[in-house]
Image (cartoon, rainbow, N blue to C red):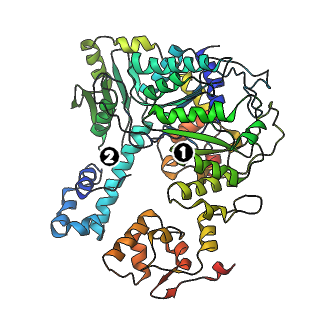
């Protein structure tokens, strides 16, 4: 197989992994380098379905001795086309695309062909070639393979900007429904702990497959919160399960995109707005599933007993209101501290509050603006 | 995009194709607060001009494809609407300090090397020929080897995920990309179908 054919196979296998490219500024300003890290996300291309490509995403090899039921590379799918890059070949392919300004950085993962440490070593050799031989100083997101060695994780932390190891499932029993070989605690959680101490500049992320093993939203979000608190994750990605032909799960139901969206929104409330988990849990049904629509709206409807007085509400109360974000809440609190009263809707609009969404939950001078839709 | 200061607004607005010096006369009559909060029609016009320039720069630094010359020259030909060629050259000079950057546009040819940006009225092809006579072949680029044009197509096609295909891609793709010159061409070239089917 030539390089272009390998790219077709290995690029396609890597597309299921979610990532974004929020870079950190380059700490070094030497001239003897190729590339730098921008402090913003730059797209390089748009696919017809509207997906923005900024990173060169590929596997080192799709040969894999693990048995994940949803994956075409697993031992349960013996008829897949197998391809492998060696370190130098992959590094050159990426550098040419980078210099031509097609991609912003590289996202590298791999199947586990036999020994995980050997597979991890191949990936590290690609990344070392990029950093040392080609003096690449741009963005590298490197997957840590379940079963990789501690020294390898440490080395990865020195070479890559971001590291990640996929959780796939929210707990051990759910993972067992997907794979008999992967061990939740030793293969995955332990590696996450090592990554936490490895010191990658852009930190670590992880990915959960949603809908692959019957888990509820409660299980997923509970695990996400634990991850943010204990593993200091930057972000959890939620990848909706899509059955792939040729895998044991090809007949399973596809996860609706709305479920993925609800999880991301709830995750944002927990991670950025610091909502207590009990608030989000309080809007779930008996099966632990989130309702359709905006979780913030559901939380406000469930937990705000009466409209908030905008001139006396605390920051934590204000961010519970749909249409009031972190910045608007800070500005309102700033006005409270300087004893300025908010007396009109126009003032709230100028602050940045989205009135259409916030009005039913706010009271200005004792008055509440409501429409009939609120009662439906 | 980060919020612009008044100075940045003026700096970017000056590059707009429709900018005239008397656009700035109003600044002398208005307070800083009026200008930065776009309280007047003139300040909003200035902001819109600056925003258009910055938007074009952001799009082009993401989507301008560079060609590689074995003498260590990265070059591209484009016709930006606003005068941002030197900004683009500066951006790529910082990104690729080992190479010489050449950008050909309707306003001339811009050359970036050794922390200097020059503008020439000569054609881009002539400039590159002149540079080839003075610059040695780049060992870095010869180590990389030749570029196969099918590489990008192969990777781009591999990222397509039919299970994520939406019935309303027009809504999914930001308008700023749909409006870009060359975007329709890229979509058509790689996927055979016309972009118009997405826009209907």
Query: In x, y percent, where is residue A372?
Result: 64, 83
Q: Which mark is residue A230?
A: 1
**Which of labels 2 and 1 is toward the front?**
1
The image shows residue B142, relative to residue A153, as above or below, that is above
Chain letter behind tag 1: A
Crowding at mark 2 (Cα within 10 Å: few <14, some 14-19, many 20+): many
Quarter of the image with the N terminus of chain A in it? top right
Q: What kind of element bears circle 2?
A: loop
Q: Nearer the viewer, residue B90 or A366?
A: A366
Q: What kind of element bears circle 1?
A: helix
Q: Nearer the viewer, residue A37 or A197?
A: A197
Query: In x, y percent, where is residue B137?
Result: 33, 11
Q: Which mark is residue B82?
A: 2
Q: Is residue B171 left or right of residue B93?
A: right
Crowding at mark 1 (Cα within 10 Å: few <14, some 14-19, many 20+): few
Q: Quadrant of residue A159?
A: top left
Farthest-out residue, bottom = A366
Query: In x, y percent, where is residue A317?
Result: 50, 71
Q: Quadrant of residue A149?
A: top right
Identify the residue shown where x is 17% and y is 63%.
B25
Q: From this viewpoint, is residue A261 visible?
A: yes
């Amino acid at each position: 197989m030539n390089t272009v054919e390998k790219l077709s196979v290995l690029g396609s296998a890597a597309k299921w992994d979610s990532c974004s490219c929020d870079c950190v500024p380059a700490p070094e300003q030497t001239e003897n380098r190729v590339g730098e890290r921008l402090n913003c996300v730059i797209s390089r291309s748009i696919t017809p379905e509207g997906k923005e490509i900024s990173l060169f995403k590929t596997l080192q090899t799709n040969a894999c001795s693990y048995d994940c039921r949803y994956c075409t590379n697993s031992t349960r799918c013996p008829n897949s086309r197998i391809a492998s890059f060696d370190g130098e070949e992959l590094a050159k392919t990426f550098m040419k695309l980078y210099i031509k300004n097609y991609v912003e950085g590289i996202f590298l993962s791999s199947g586990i062909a036999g020994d995980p440490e050997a597979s991890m070593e191949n990936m590290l050799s690609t990344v070392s070639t990029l950093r040392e031989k080609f003096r690449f100083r741009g963005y590298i997101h490197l997957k840590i393979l379940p079963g990789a060695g501690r020294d390898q994780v440490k080395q990865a932390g020195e070479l890559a900007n971001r590291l990640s190891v996929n959780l796939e499932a929210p707990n051990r029993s759910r993972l067992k429904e997907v794979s008999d070989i992967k061990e939740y605690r030793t293969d995955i959680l332990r590696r996450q702990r090592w990554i936490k101490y490895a010191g990658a500049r852009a930190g670590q992320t992880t990915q959960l497959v949603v809908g692959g093993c019957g888990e509820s939203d409660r299980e997923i979000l509970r695990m996400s919160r634990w991850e943010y608190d204990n593993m200091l994750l930057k972000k959890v990605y939620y990848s909706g399960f899509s059955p792939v032909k040729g895998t044991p799960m090809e007949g399973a139901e596809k996860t609706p995109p709305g479920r993925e969206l609800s999880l991301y929104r709830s995750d944002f409330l927990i991670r950025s707005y610091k909502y207590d988990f009990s608030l989000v849990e309080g809007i779930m049904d008996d099966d632990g599933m989130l309702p359709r629509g905006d979780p913030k709206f559901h939380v406000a409807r469930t937990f705000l007993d009466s409209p908030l007085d905008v001139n006396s509400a605390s920051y934590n109360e204000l961010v519970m209101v749909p249409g009031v974000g972190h910045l608007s809440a800070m500005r309102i609190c700033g006005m409270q501290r300087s004893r300025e009263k908010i007396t009109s809707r126009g003032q709230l609009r100028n602050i940045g509050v989205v009135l259409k969404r916030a009005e039913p939950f706010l009271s200005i001078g004792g008055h509440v603006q409501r429409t009939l839709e609120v009662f439906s | 995009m980060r919020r612009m200061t008044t100075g940045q607004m003026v700096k970017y607005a000056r590059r707009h194709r429709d900018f005239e010096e008397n656009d700035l006369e109003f600044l002398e009559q208005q307070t800083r607060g009026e200008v930065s909060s776009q309280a007047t029609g003139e300040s909003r016009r200035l902001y819109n001009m600056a925003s258009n320039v910055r938007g074009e720069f952001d799009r082009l630094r993401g989507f301008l494809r560079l060609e590689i010359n074995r003498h260590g020259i990265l070059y591209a030909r484009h016709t930006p609407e606003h005068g941002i060629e030197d900004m683009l050259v500066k951006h790529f000079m910082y990104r690729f300090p080992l190479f010489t950057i050449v950008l050909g546009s309707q306003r001339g040819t811009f050359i970036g090397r050794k922390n200097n940006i020059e503008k020439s009225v000569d054609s881009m092809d002539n400039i590159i020929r002149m540079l080839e006579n003075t610059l040695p072949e780049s060992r870095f680029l010869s180590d990389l080897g030749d570029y196969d044009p099918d590489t990008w197509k192969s990777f781009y096609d591999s990222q397509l995920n039919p299970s994520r295909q939406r019935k309303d891609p027009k809504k999914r793709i930001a308008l700023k990309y749909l409006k870009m010159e060359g975007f329709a061409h890229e979509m058509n070239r790689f996927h055979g179908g016309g972009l118009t089917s997405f826009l209907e």
